[in-house]
C-alpha cells in the first residue's frame, strides 16, 4: 500500500474520533503505510482497545465540542508527534431524527457543536502546526447529506453542508501556506451507525427496518453501501503525493447517492 499510495514515511496524522468506526479504519490505514498516529475519542473502551492494539499511537480522550478539551488534545499532539502534517476532522454524530417542529434546541445545538464547531476548534489549533509542515493537509469528513436535502435529519444535514463551506474557505485561505483542504462525503457506510439511523428513520415513518434499508439502497446508483475502507483509501490518496495538487474539493464516496 505504501508504494502504491506513495505516502510520505513518518507523516504525522491526527484523526478525531479515531477510536472506532470510520476513524479507526482511517487511522489503521495510515499507520500501515508508515504514518505516526494520534487519535482521540469519547469512548474509553475504544481508546483502551487502541492502547492495547497500537502501543506507538498517541491516545487522548477528547470531546471535540468542548474547546478546552480540544486545547488539551493539541498539547498531547505536540508532545507525542512533535508537530502535525495531517488533520483528519472525522468526529461527528448522527443527531436526532424527526420533523423540524419536533426537535428541541438542545438536540440542534449538540449536533452543531460536535459536527461543525468541533471541526473549527481542531482546525484553528492545527493550522499553526500545519504551517510548519512541508506536506500539510486538512480533510473534513462531511456527508452526502452535505450536498442533498435530508428530511427528518435537518440538524445533521445543516452541519454537514457547513463543513463544506469551512473546507472551501480554508483551501483558499491556507493555499498560499501550502496547506491543502478537502472534504470527503461518505454515503451509506455499512456498519452499526447506519443500522441505528435506518432503524430510527423506519420508526419515524412507520415502516419496517427491512423496507427502510431497501429504500436507502435503492437511492444509490450502484445499489450498494460503501465501506469505511473506501473512505480511508480516499483520505490516503489526498494526503499522498498523488493528491499534491488537489485542494478545495468536495469528493463523494457513495456509489452515487441520488437522493436522501
Image (tube, rainbow, N blue to C red):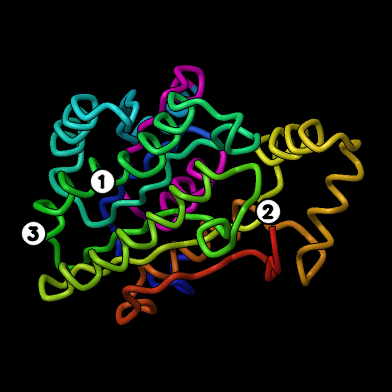
Circles 1 and 3 in contact, beta carbons < 8 Å: no
- Dot 3 lies on which element? loop
Residue 87 on image: x %, y %: 29, 52
Residue at position x 60%, y 51% in the image: 228
Left/right of residue 179 with respect to residue 239 in the rendered view:
left
Quadrant (top left/top right/bottom left/bottom right) for the C terminus: bottom right
Magenta stretch in the rendered image: 21-48
- Sequence-first tag of 3 and 2: 3
Would you say 197 lies left or right of 74 here?
A: right
Secondary structure of residue under mark 2: loop
Q: Which mark is residue 120?
A: 1
Q: Position of residue 48 (x, y in %)?
A: 45, 20
Residue 132 tag number: 3
Name the residue carrying label 2.
188
Real-space CA distance between mark 1 and mark 2, rounded to the nearest whole angstrom: 25 Å
Q: Does the magenta-highlighted stretch encompass residue 29?
A: yes
Q: In x, y percent, where is residue 107?
A: 48, 27
Residue at the image position 36 percent from the left and 51 percent from the top: 88
What secondary structure characterizes most of the magenta part?
A: helix
Camera-nearest residue between 205 and 202: 205
Q: Earlier in the sequence, mark 1 or mark 3?
A: 1
Amino acid at each position: 500500500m505504501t508504494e502504491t499510495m506513495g505516502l510520505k514515511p513518518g507523516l504525522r496524522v491526527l484523526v478525531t474520533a479515531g477510536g472506532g468506526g470510520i476513524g479507526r479504519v482511517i487511522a489503521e490505514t495510515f499507520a500501515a503505510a508508515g504514518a505516526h498516529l494520534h487519535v482521540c475519542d469519547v469512548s474509553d473502551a475504544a481508546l483502551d482497545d487502541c492502547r492495547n492494539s497500537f502501543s506507538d499511537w498517541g491516545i487522548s480522550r477528547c470531546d471535540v465540542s468542548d474547546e478546552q478539551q480540544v486545547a488539551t488534545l493539541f498539547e498531547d499532539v505536540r508532545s507525542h508527534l512533535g508537530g502535525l502534517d495531517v488533520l483528519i476532522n472525522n468526529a461527528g454524530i448522527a443527531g436526532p431524527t424527526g420533523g423540524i417542529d419536533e426537535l428541541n434546541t438542545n438536540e440542534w445545538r449538540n449536533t452543531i457543536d460536535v459536527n461543525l464547531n468541533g471541526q473549527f476548534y481542531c482546525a484553528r489549533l492545527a493550522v499553526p502546526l500545519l504551517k510548519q509542515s512541508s506536506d500539510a493537509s486538512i480533510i473534513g469528513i462531511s456527508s452526502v447529506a452535505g450536498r442533498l436535502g435530508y428530511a427528518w435529519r435537518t440538524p445533521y444535514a445543516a452541519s454537514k453542508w457547513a463543513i463544506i463551506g469551512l473546507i472551501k474557505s480554508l483551501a483558499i485561505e491556507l493555499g498560499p501556506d501550502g496547506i491543502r483542504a478537502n472534504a470527503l462525503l461518505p454515503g451509506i457506510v455499512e456498519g452499526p451507525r447506519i443500522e441505528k439511523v435506518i432503524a430510527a428513520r423506519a420508526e419515524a415513518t412507520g415502516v419496517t427496518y427491512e423496507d427502510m434499508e431497501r429504500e436507502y439502497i435503492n437511492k444509490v446508483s450502484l445499489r450498494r453501501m460503501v465501506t469505511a475502507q473506501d473512505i480511508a483509501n480516499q483520505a490516503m490518496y489526498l494526503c499522498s503525493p498523488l493528491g499534491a495538487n488537489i485542494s478545495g474539493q468536495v469528493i463523494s464516496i457513495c456509489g452515487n447517492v441520488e437522493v436522501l
